[in-house]
């Protein structure tokens, strides 16, 4: 017996009888798209903004210390020059901190690939410092979660 002959098991001219439904047919509804909002991302955004604001307050405080050093302090000569250089370098570091935290907050807010990379790079840079290590590790671990990663790479 040949398989494709007339009346054979795979005869192309004979249609098999339709199968009877065994289960109740349920209506299928397409799943809703994933929301891009997340409490964790909002908390990260808020933390970045708060830390940027604290860095700006630090710079303002350093400007006040510089004003005191120039006007009311008893320091003079090389000690005053060294103190002014130190305050200037701390002010520059404060502006860098404020800018980095503001950029990383903007990156989280946009939820784009570039924003993800900015946030990860800022966290890695802060991991190089002893003070920034807890923040950097927590942020990197949070961003590596599949749910969080998917919100940036839709």
Image (cartoon, helix red, strand yellow):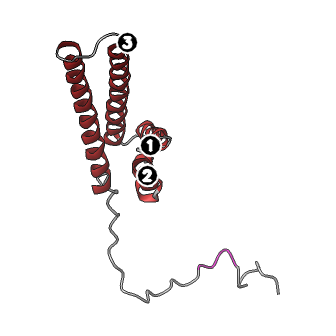
Q: Secondary structure at mark 3?
A: helix
Magenta residues? 11-15
Gap between marks 3 and 1 measured at Cα? 38 Å
**Mark drawn on residue 143:** 2
Q: Position of residue 54 (x, y in %)?
A: 25, 37
Instruction: Verify whether residue 89 appears in magenta.
Output: no
Q: Secondary structure at mark 1?
A: helix
Up the image or down, 58 lies above or below 11; here it is: above
Q: Which residue is mark 1?
A: 123
Residue neighbourhood size for the residue with mark 1, other residues' Cα within 10 Å, grouped as few (<14), some (14–19), many (≥20):
many
Tell me which residue sits at (26%, 27%) in the image. Answer: 59
**Mark drawn on residue 78:** 3
Observer-side mark, 1 or 2, equals 1
Of 99 and 28, nearer the camera is 99
Within the image, what quadrant is residue 83 found in?
Answer: top left
21 sits left or right of 7 in the view: left
Dominant secondary structure, magenta: loop
Up the image or down, 106 lies above or below 150; here it is: above
Q: Position of residue 77 (x, y in %)?
A: 33, 10
46 sits left or right of 104 in the view: left
Q: Position of residue 108 (x, y in %)?
A: 35, 42
Of 118 and 122, nearer the camera is 122
Tell me which residue sits at (37%, 12%) in the image. Answer: 78
88 sits left or right of 62 in the view: right
Gap between marks 1 and 2 measured at Cα? 10 Å
Of 142 and 126, nearer the camera is 126
């Amino acid at each position: 017996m040949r398989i494709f002959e007339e009346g054979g098991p795979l005869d192309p001219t004979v249609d098999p009888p339709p199968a009877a439904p065994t289960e109740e047919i349920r209506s299928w509804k397409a799943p809703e798209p994933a929301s891009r909002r997340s409490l964790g991302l909002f908390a990260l955004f808020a933390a970045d903004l708060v830390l940027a604001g604290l860095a700006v307050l630090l710079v303002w405080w350093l400007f006040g210390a510089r004003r005191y050093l120039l006007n009311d302090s008893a320091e003079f000569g090389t000690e005053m020059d060294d103190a002014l250089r130190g305050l200037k370098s701390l002010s520059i570091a404060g502006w860098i901190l404020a800018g980095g935290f503001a950029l990383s907050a903007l990156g989280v807010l946009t939820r784009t690939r570039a924003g993800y990379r900015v946030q990860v790079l800022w966290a890695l840079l802060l991991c190089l410092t002893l003070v920034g290590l807890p923040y950097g590790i927590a942020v990197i671990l949070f961003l590596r979660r599949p749910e969080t990663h998917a919100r940036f790479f839709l």
